[in-house]
Amino acid sequence: MLAAMRPILTLTLILLLQASSAEPSLESAAQNPAEAKLSAQRSAFRDAYAHAEKGDEAGVAEHLDLLADYILLPDLEAAIIRANLKKASDYRVETFLATHNSLPVAAEVRRKWLNELARKQRWSKYLEIYTVDESTTRRCHMFTARIATGKTRQLADEILPLWLVGKSQPDACDLPFKYLDEVGYLTEARKRKRFEMAIADRNLSLARFLAGSLDWQDRDWAARWQRMRSNPTAELRQPTRFKNNSAERELILFGFHRLARQDPLYTAKAWLDYRTQFDFSAAERNGVSRKIAVWAARKHLPDSAELLAAVPARARNLDVREWQVRTALRNRDWAAVYAYINELPGAERDQEMWRYWRGRALQELGQNEAADAVFRGLAKERDYYGFLAADQVGLPYRFEHRPIVPDTELLTSLADRPALKRARELYEVGQHGRARSEWNRQIAGMSASERAQAALIAHQWGWASRAIAAASVGSMLDDLEIRFPTPYREIFAQKTDEANIAFSWAYGIARSESLFMPDVSSSAGAIGLMQLMPATGRQVARSARLKYRNQYSLLDPELNITLGTKYLGRMYERFGGNQVLATAAYNAGPHRVSRWLPEDGEVIADVWVDTIPFTETRGYVRRVLSSQVIFTWRITGSQQRLAELMPPVTTAEQLAKLTRL
């Protein structure tokens, strides 16, 4: 879920997270006047910032003497300006922008100020302040400002590329687009071209809107695309409803690709009539066949092996070939597993996953010496497949922890950079999202040696997510203390004990979910350190009789860990003490995992994991389990065998018996 995360804290809510800041103790502060002052400044800033967000300058003024030389002082002024934008003077805003132009906080003020100028329709001032901006909304406001001020030279040519796209644009673009129409730029040909672009991009709502200015045939065509998206089964019931031309064939293909996800076997039967009656190209026919076969395999349907094999060899892409291996695994056809792995492209075949399964296939086929050689080579790796391979041949795990060597001179130099100082202080005062933005901007331009020392700095500050991210390449991957830290340790220890689950397992979940960031949410709406959905958090809190006001309660690390570990414990119980299933359920939901259980017999856990239908969930389970092994070693110094965490996956009926015992 990490590639989709975004900060969701308002600046007021961030103050809830103060307790997690790693500030000096009173004793150390007393021994170090500079640290004592810095600690006092952080506390004063938090209080002042709460006033600044409300536009309360008097409340801020009480702290200004102490904060006069504090590096985040400009952020207080920025917060006051943002709070008072509707009545802020041009002089105050422009002075701030000129004084602090190089700071990210100035860019934020500039964006807010431009939005306010647009709201007030102060277009001349807007053009004075506007600089090149990647925001389509602000760019369209700039076009509006030029229209309003008569600066229209070559304007239509600049607006047209924003209009001529297959997606909807912000409301701010309505007036510039109206201008295009008024000056005669929105010709019939261009309107039809955009309509076709919307169809091609499958933006069918936009296509239907654009069709309103075209003839009845275009309106009917847009409606047919909408119906095909909503109910492809009904639309494809009669082949005679379609003409054999390129446009109608494109519509048919769209429908079959959608239908294949819903019901692959029905799609396979329906496709037989269409593929013979219409002049599809070989590439188009193969595309539908691939889609049907792969979705049949993902759903573990009985005919999936035959459907995959029916795809012509030259048309089998990597997705088809990998699912041929997975289907053979699920069917325990080890000869086919070995054969299909050998048919993979060389670079793919040499990946650790397929090396492991080649070894397993050799083992099952009785070629133990060859299998042993594969496993011994793979057991040198510190990851999921390396651990599984080591289990196969009884070798110890190769953790190979190598700490990053401190470079005192470079550490000092980096720590003195104003941008990193700002990032640290933003982190310490609880403004985690802004802190990450400023940190990431600096890290992006660093050399490998600088990045290594930056990882050390973040680790020393207790900033787990940035330390992990900075140490995510090259030789830094071997510093397991930095890459697998144990923040909130006392809370995790207590809450996992209460939930009766493994301490290291919960750490593996939290690291995989959020890199221990308490203030992030996923695109799906999961929140906080253990990425709980608000409805799940509310339900668990209610049943545990814990205080839960609203979704923002999940931003409190202790409550998030409490609810996350309780929910994880419930998944553990629901799936009969099987961590593999419980981990998958935490990611994909328990109802999906129940549907993925075998219908008869049992499936070996490593096979079950690598035949999970969702790519994300397969990777998630592997990542969490291997992280658990590393966290166990980090916390206890002992090895926990991955095989111990992976009992066979049983049927729903057998699982029900286990949970009743």
Image (tube, rainbow, N blue to C red):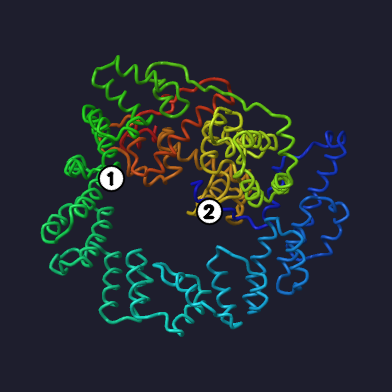
Residue highlighted by disc 2: 534
Relative to the observer, which residue lies in front, 380 or 573?
380
Q: Amino acid at mark 2?
A: Pro
Relative to the observer, which residue lies in front, 164 or 546?
164
Residue highlighted by disc 1: 299
Q: Residue at x 78, y 37 (%)?
A: 24
Q: Whole-percent x and y of residue 52?
A: 76, 61
Neighbourhood count class around disc 2 (C-alpha, 10 Å): few under 14, some 14–19, many 20 upward: some
Relative to the observer, which residue lies in front, 511 or 141?
141
CB under 8 Å between discs 1 and 2 = no
Q: Whole-percent x and y of residue 411?
A: 71, 34
Q: Quarter of the image for the C terminus: give it.
A: top left
Q: Picture quarter containing residue 29? A: top right
Q: Residue furthest front?
A: 153
Q: Residue at x 50, y 43 (%)?
A: 567
**Left or right placement of residue 31 versus residue 414 in this view:** right
Between disc 1 and disc 2, the foreground one is: 1
User: Which mark identifies residue 567?
Assistant: none
